[in-house]
Amino acid sequence: MSPQSRVGRRRSTTPAHITDVALELFTARGFSDVSVDDVAHAAGIARRTLFRYYASKNAILWGDFDAHLGHLRELLDNVDPQVVMGQALRAALLAFNTFDESETVRHRQRMRIILETAELQAYSMTMYAGWREVIAGFVAARLGVKTTDPLPQTVAWTMLGVALSAYEQWLSDETVTLPEALGNAFDVVGAGLNELNA
């Protein structure tokens, strides 16, 4: 047996590994020019294994977004009720979009693909719906209204607009940090949101 032979079980696959491999391929070749088979092959797994982790190629870039939404919900659930609405939403937006500095390049690649790939836009809207639901739920609970009422829905859509405009600025101007872009975008609407306390 050669020293390079492997004994035992093959290294287990993780969703993060699949996402990392896919991100490299999408960045190098373009999202449209990479197939599910390409991703599976590069990750060293079968196509069916990839589909155990992700329902579609579109889903791969989003990783475990449900876990991220759980984190956002937790951030908002832990806000002191005395903190005004705008401050609470601003702090949660910044915390939700905080990541290790070593991840900046990778996160920029991921967001560039998500925001600038036409064929991903419809799928992205379904993902944004979950994010908006968390925001609307927080606002509704604070104001004692239903999540589906116009005010929580309007705030949720506004917050999505804030986040997306900040990401667009961050992607187009690498001298701007993401927290700066998010803070600046939020401050355009923050005063109005601070008026929404119950």
Image (tube, grey):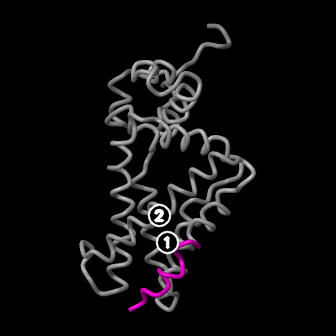
Q: Position of residue 86 (x, y in %)?
A: 51, 80
Residue furthest to the right in view is: 175
Mark 2 Cα-neighbour bin, 10 Å: few <14, some 14–19, many ≥20: some
The residue pinned by badge 1 equals: 75
For mark 2, give the secondary structure.
helix
- Which portion, as a residue range, is magenta? 187-198
| Badge 1 element | helix
User: Residue 184: which numbered mark, if any?
Assistant: none
Image position of 18 with respect to 2: above or below: below
Q: Residue at x 68, y 63 (%)?
A: 180
Residue 116, compared with residue 82, is above or below; it is: above
The kind of residue on which mark 1 rests is: Leu
From the top left corner, tell me how far across and down residue 165 is, in percent: 53, 56
Residue type highlighted by circle 2: His
Q: Position of residue 4 (x, y in %)?
A: 65, 13
How many marks are shown on the rendered structure? Answer: 2
Please report the residue visible at 53 percent of the width from the left and 82 percent of the height from the top: 191
Q: Residue 138: x percent and y percent?
A: 38, 76
Does the residue at mark 2 contact the one at mark 1 (Cβ under 8 Å)? yes
Residue 141 picture quarter: bottom left
Position of 67 compared to 187: left or right?
A: left
Residue 193 magenta-highlighted: yes
Query: Which residue shows up at 55% across the image and 34% down it?
Result: 20
Magenta portion: prevailing SS class:
helix
Residue 51 highlighted magenta (yes or no) = no
Q: Residue at x 39, y 72 (%)?
A: 155
Quadrant of the rendering where the N terminus is positioned: top right
Looking at this view, is 1 or 160 the one in front? Answer: 160
